[in-house]
Each structure stands twice: as structure tokens, then as C-alpha cells.
Amino acid sequence: MLESLNALEKEGLDALKALAQAEELPVWYRTYLGRKGRLTEVLRGLGVLSAEERPHAGRRANEIKTALESAFETRQDELRAAEMEASLASGALDVTLPGRPVAPGHLHLSTRMLRRIRAIFAEMGFQVYEAPEVETDENNFELLNIPPYHPARDMWDTFWINDQVVLRTHTSPGQIRCMRENHPHPIRVILPGKCYRYEQVTPRSEHQFYQVEGLAVGHNIRITDLIGTMHEFARKMHGAARRLRIRGSYFPFTEPSIEIDMDCILCAGKGCRVCKFTSWLEIAGAGMVHPVVLRNGGYDPDQWSGFAFGMGVERPAMLHHGIEDIRYFYSNDLRFLRQF
Ligand code: PHE
């Protein structure tokens, strides 16, 4: 028994030394140390030994097992190191190669539009007022002169959080917050932000989009101030030759209400597909702040007046860049986003 154990040890160690590749290690392990390997086979013969011989042979078998295992570890390290060195020497890994470039990101098209709009209004003395996207029904509708069941609510399909809380359907509720915070001082702000509408998503309408609201409150503010401000904005944003057209409109929170069109940036009035052969592009809804809204904001409408406007952000960007589908803005396709 002891003889065959000693023979096994020698044979195992020799075989291990003879291995040329790390790949061969598992076969060696299975042959000598595996569950059905040579050592197990020898140990199975322990049963036939006499009671005096058995502990002796058992101890020796355990020694051999440990010896073979540690020899295996050592050989494994040797072979792996040798292979690593060989592969380095053969140039498989060129550590002098330049790394893969990590492309820097850039601002989203909507963000860039917003920044331009902000900069233009900043030059005209408008500050930025930030209001939350989750609003109360009160601010989004009621204090803007749109009571429950008012038919004008149909103008804004709404995501309701619960009976009293909505995702704002426009940036106008910020007017109320801003007035309540600032009265009785004059105001000149823009309120940029994300709005939500419970709408069918189509190439022309998304259920989320940006608006930039404008609000000026002071003494003797007139509709000509509003028109002048919008004209200046249109020229700075879309070119010095821009002309405006004013149409009467209706919003519950402005009186009078107007809609502001700009001559088409593509055909400059000749008529084309972008302006649908009307020569005009709508850029904002606007008007003089309704006396009820002024009062809700804390201003006496006999002493104060104001104008407000609300304009889209994505639509002008689409016109400008010839983007045909608003859904690209939020679908995160890098092939689209990288173009801007
Ligand atoms: N809030 C209006 C809309 O979303 C736009 C608007 C803003 C009109 C301010 C008048 C004054 O349609």
C-alpha cells in the first residue's frame, strides 16, 4: 500500500512537471485528485488493510494529497505566468496603443434653445422665475380665471395626480406664484419650464414640451410694450428682418388676448410648406393680464397693469432645423441628438 502511494506521488509530480500548457491542468487534476481519480482509487483499498496498517497509510495518503495540491497551485502559477510573458513578448497586447476615445456629451437641443431665449430676454431686463412642474388645480386653473367646469378647461387636456393636483399644462400658473411672492413690486420675468398635456402623441404634438412664459407687471404697462418686446425677441432670435402680425384671440387669464405671428423664417412671406403657404408662423399666445388674475396675485388692477405671453420651445427649433417629428426630442436617439 505504502509503496503504491509513494509511486503515485512520484508519478503525479512528474506528470505535473511535464505539462506544457495551463490548458492541460484540469485534466491532470481530474486524473490525480478528482473524485474518480487515482488517489481516491488507492484510498478505496484502505479497507482491506489491517487495523495497525490503516492509520499509517491514511496519514501518508493525506500528506500526498496536500503535496499534490500545493504542487498543482505552484505549477498553475508558473504556467500562467509563462503564458502571459509569451503573449506580451509576441506583441498581443500593445500597451502603447492610444485608448478608445470617450466622446464628450453636449447640450440637448431644447436646452440650447432655452439658453438662447433666456439670454435674449436677459438683455431686455427679464429675470428668470422657476416654478414647479407639479401644480395645484388652483394655480393651474382657478386663480387664472378658469373655474371648475369652465369650458376653457378643454383647451388643456390634463394629467391629474389627484382631485387637486395636476402636472402643469402650461407655465402660466407660475404667474400667480411670482406675483404673490413679489407684490407690491413691479415684475419683469420669464418662466421657462416643462409642461404636460394628456394628448395623443403625434409628429406634431408631444405630451411633454417646454414653454417660456413672460410676465411684466407695473404702472402703465400697455399692449404696445408687449408687442415691442415680442418684436425685439423675434428679431434677435430669428433675424433682424422679422415682422410680426397680431391676431385677436381668447385666453381666460388675459384681456384682451392676442396671438402673435412672425413672418415665415424660410420663405419670408412668399409661402412654403413650413408655413403651410400662409407666410406666417405662430410664435406666442399673449395678452394683458386679466384684472381678476392681477387681483389674485395681490395687485390692485386700478393701480397696476401687466402683460403676459407664452411660447413654445420645440416648435421654433423644428422650423429652424427642418425637424419633421417632435417625438425625436425625447426618444434619445443619439443619431438625432448628435446633429445639434
Ligand atoms: N398659457 C397659454 C397656453 O398654454 C399661453 C399664454 C400665456 C397665453 C400667457 C396668454 C398669456 O396656451
Image (spheres, rainbow, N blue to C red):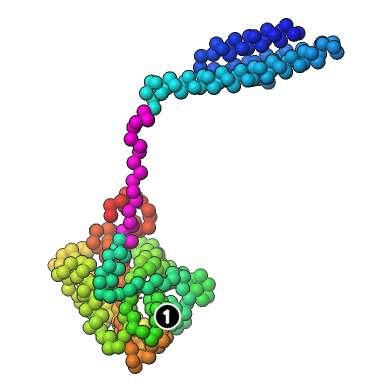
Q: Residue at x 35, y 90 (%)?
A: 301
Q: Name the residue nearer the viewer: 137 or 133.
A: 133
Q: Is residue 149 left or right of residue 71?
A: left
Location of residue 148 in the rendering, given as x and y in whole percent from the top left corner: 47, 82
Principal secondary structure, stretch drawn in magenta: loop
Residue 316 lies in quadrant: bottom left
Location of residue 252 in the rendering, given as x and y in whole percent from the top left corner: 37, 83
Residue 36 highlighted magenta (yes or no): no
Location of residue 102 in the rendering, given as x and y in whole percent from the top left corner: 35, 44
Q: Which residue is mark 1?
A: 181
Q: Residue at x 39, y 71 (%)?
A: 130
Residue 45 lies in quadrant: top right
Location of residue 235 in the rendering, given as x and y in whole percent from the top left corner: 19, 70
Extreme residue toward the bottom, this view: 302
Residue 104 highlighted magenta (yes or no): yes
Magenta stretch in the rendered image: 94-111
The quadrant of the image that shows the C terminus is: bottom left
The quadrant of the image that shows the N terminus is: top right
Relative vertical location of residue 199 with respect to residue 107 in this rendering, above or below: below
Q: Is residue 4 left or right of residue 323?
A: right
- Amino acid tagged 1: Glu
Q: Name the residue nearer the viewer: 54 or 235.
A: 54
- Total tally of numbered discs in the picture: 1
Q: Secondary structure at mark 1?
A: helix
Residue 71 can be seen, yes or no: yes
